[in-house]
């Protein structure tokens, strides 16, 4: 039985960053994609970083050296983002609070509220008495269809997956609970971050893993 309704107006947003230093908080916006609730692409932009790029974090972003040479200044991309948004729009995404910070968006001015898919699909694991969080790729490939999100990362695909996941599960509590059980049963492989011990090309990736952090920057909660 439905316990809540889908937002009347929402967009799904995906932001990718490159590393501009060794700390896990040394990041610069490199890609921005926005898709509306009908999966229409409203924005897909590359951003040229002001600082020297230490790592393109290729397995995560799909970017390589030279890919951002024709990118636009961050200020012009931010202006386009803010023209698309409005105070009545709900922002949807995986860890969407990070996207809000990267894009310098303000609640009540650029959007009304957010829906974090990571929080929506977090599942209580009775075996270990804790909550499990899942990456967007696992959510999409398990709950939509296998291969929806591939290793060849594409921000528009990620945003479209977010639209479909929200539509299918957000307003149906029974279906959502079954989805969480399925995510727990079908365990994802170790993330790229964990596979590489939270470091890549000299860059710390341990923003959410304080025990693995070697750079000394403040860590975050999931």
Image (spheres, rainbow, N blue to C red):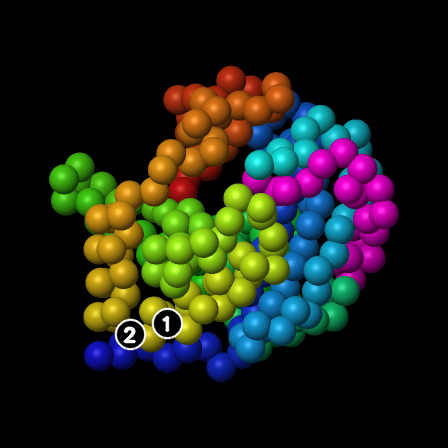
User: What residue range appears in magenta?
Assistant: 60-79
Tell me the quadrant of the picture where the N terminus can be found: bottom left
**Residue 10 image position (x, y, % from top left):** 54, 73
**From what the image shows, is residue 200 above or below residue 16?**
above
On the question of residue 113 being in view, the answer is no
Q: Which residue is mark 2?
A: 172
In the structure shown, which secondary structural element does the residue marked by tag 1 occupy?
Answer: helix
Residue occupying image coordinates x 78% and y 62%:
79
Give the CA distance from mark 2 to mark 1.
8 Å
**From what the image shows, is residue 27 above or below residue 144?**
above
Which of the 4 image quadrants contains residue 23?
top right
Residue occupying image coordinates x 62% and y 42%:
61
Is 76 part of what is drawn in magenta? yes
**Residue 20 image position (x, y, % from top left):** 71, 30
**From what the image shows, is residue 168 above or below residue 70?**
below
Left or right of residue 95, residue 49 in this image: right
Local packing at callout 2 (Cα closer than 10 Å; few below 14, some 14-19, many 20+) is some
Residue occupying image coordinates x 53% and y 44%:
151
**Residue 46 image position (x, y, % from top left):** 75, 51
Residue occupying image coordinates x 34% and y 42%:
188
On the question of residue 90 being in view, the answer is yes
**Residue 165 image position (x, y, % from top left):** 41, 65
**From what the image shows, is residue 67 above or below residue 209?**
below
Left or right of residue 43, residue 12 in this image: left
Q: Which residue is mark 1?
A: 168
Which of the 4 image quadrants contains residue 42?
bottom right
Q: Are marks 2 and 1 in contact (CB under 8 Å)?
A: yes
Tell me the quadrant of the picture where the C terminus can be found: top left
């Amino acid at each position: 039985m439905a316990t809540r309704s889908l937002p009347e107006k929402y967009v799904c947003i995906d932001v990718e960053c490159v590393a501009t230093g060794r700390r896990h908080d040394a990041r610069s916006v490199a890609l921005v994609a926005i898709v509306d609730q009908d999966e229409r692409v409203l924005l897909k932009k590359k951003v040229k970083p002001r600082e020297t790029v230490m790592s393109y974090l290729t397995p995560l972003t799909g970017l390589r050296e030279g890919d951002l040479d024709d990118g636009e200044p961050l200020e012009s991309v931010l202006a386009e983002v803010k023209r698309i948004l409005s105070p009545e729009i709900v922002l949807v995404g995986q860890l969407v609070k990070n996207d809000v910070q990267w894009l310098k968006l303000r609640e009540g001015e650029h959007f009304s509220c957010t829906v974090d898919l990571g929080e929506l699909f977090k599942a209580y694991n009775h075996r270990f008495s804790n909550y499990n969080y899942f990456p967007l790729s696992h959510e999409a490939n398990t709950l939509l269809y296998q291969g929806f999100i591939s290793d060849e990362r594409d921000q528009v695909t990620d945003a479209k997956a977010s639209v479909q996941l929200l539509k299918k599960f957000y307003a149906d509590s029974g279906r959502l609970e079954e989805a969480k059980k399925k995510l727990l049963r079908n365990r994802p492989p170790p993330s790229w971050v964990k596979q590489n011990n939270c470091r890549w090309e000299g860059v710390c990736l341990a923003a959410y893993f304080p025990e693995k952090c070697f750079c000394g920057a403040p860590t975050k909660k999931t």
